[in-house]
Amino acid sequence: MAVGRVLLVAGVLVLLFIPYLLWGTGLMTARSQSLLRQQFQAEQHRAGVTAPTTPVQKVQKSAGPPKVAPTVPDPPIGSPVGTIDIPTISLNMVVVEGTGDSQLQQGPGHYTGTPLPGEAGNAAIAGHRTTYLHPFYNLNDLNPGDAILVTTTQGVFMYAVTTSQSVSPNDVSVVDASRTPELTLTTCTPRYSASQRLVVHAALVASILTHPAAAQPSPTTPAPKPASTAKDTRAQPRNWAAAILWGVAVAALISAVWVGARRTRRGARALVLVGGLLAWLVVVFAFFQSLAPLLPASY
């Protein structure tokens, strides 16, 4: 009987963990996005940007060839870089600096060491495909010419999709430096698998700079990127202790509810079971939060 109960609880946890990964992780990302958006809007205000967003049509009507922003150091890891808006796939999220596990759990992440969006060269952004609000879930639906709007404190930059391709996860050449202002988006493919990498390339076609006096003509050779203010490490420390402790808490709570229900009179037993179930779900959620980062990293 005891073995059967353990297997039953284990099966229930596995069944609950799958929807947690697909939808529950989005709760944490949504909270992070709200905080990042507030931080970015505060940075915009300090930079003298009055409007939080700019319509695609307004950028398209900007006169002359696109201007690139001056090259500046990357912001600290975990800080907001700007917003990315892709109307074709209904995406509007804040981009965070860094592509480590903890950064990609907050939203799309800018590859540290590549140019910031709007600067000369190949700016690269990664995003999850099926978890953590799955920002790049429909990235495969983009076609050549589709607009990608990126807003930073330096201005608003519109890119047009040029090509899409699938490559090996070990192929890092897709984020190599380029001689023209570009944007590269990466995510895993196919969905629910990290066997390949989907890569979308886009070219800068229009821009509106926050400070036009700092505008630079689109160069043929990008300036070198200044040293980053923080180091980007994709391999994050695995906190096994937290997962084990929460796992023990799940098992202990199950045992406590079971014993409590057996020792309670029939009339009050339902209350014990319902209260215990609610408490158990809260503890299980915390357990899943500590367990998810221990899985192999993927987009």
Image (cartoon, rainbow, N blue to C red):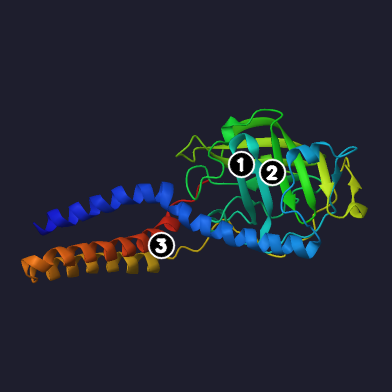
Image coordinates of residue 102 in percent, x first then y, are: 54, 59
Instruction: Give the camera-side residue of 196 and 190.
Output: 190
The answer to which quarter of the image holds residue 75 is bottom right
Please name which of the two marks, 2 or 3, marks the residue nearer to the observer: 3
In the displayed structure, 31 sits above or below 189; it is: below
Question: In the current view of this chain or complex, which residue is farthest to the right?
Answer: 213
Q: Residue at coordinates 63% horizontally, 53% vertically from top-left? A: 94
Residue 290, disc: 3
Q: Is residue 167 visible?
A: no
In the displayed structure, 281 sits above or below 133; it is: below
Image coordinates of residue 205 in percent, x first then y, are: 80, 36
In the displayed structure, 296 sits above or below 260; it is: above
Classify mark 3: helix, strand or loop.
helix
Residue 186, disc: 1
Instruction: Give the camera-side residue of 50 and 95.
Output: 50
Looking at the rendered structure, the kind of residue marked 3 is: Ser
The answer to which quarter of the image holds residue 66 is top right
Q: Sequence-wise, which precedes: disc 2 or disc 3?
A: 2
Q: Is residue 5 left or right of residue 284?
A: left
Looking at the rendered structure, the kind of residue marked 2 is: Val
Q: Residue at coordinates 17% horizontally, 66% vertically from top-left? A: 271
Count of numbered tags: 3
Q: Residues within 10 Å of mark 2 (few under 14, many from 20)?
A: many
Classify mark 2: helix, strand or loop.
helix
Looking at the rendered structure, the kind of residue marked 1 is: Thr
Q: Quadrant of the N terminus?
A: bottom left
Q: Is residue 50 left or right of residue 281?
A: right
Classify mark 1: helix, strand or loop.
strand
Q: Which residue is mark 2?
A: 175
Q: Is residue 21 left or right of residue 123?
A: left
Q: Residue at coordinates 46% horizontally, 55% vertically from top-left? A: 27
CA–CA distance in space, label 2 to label 1 = 9 Å
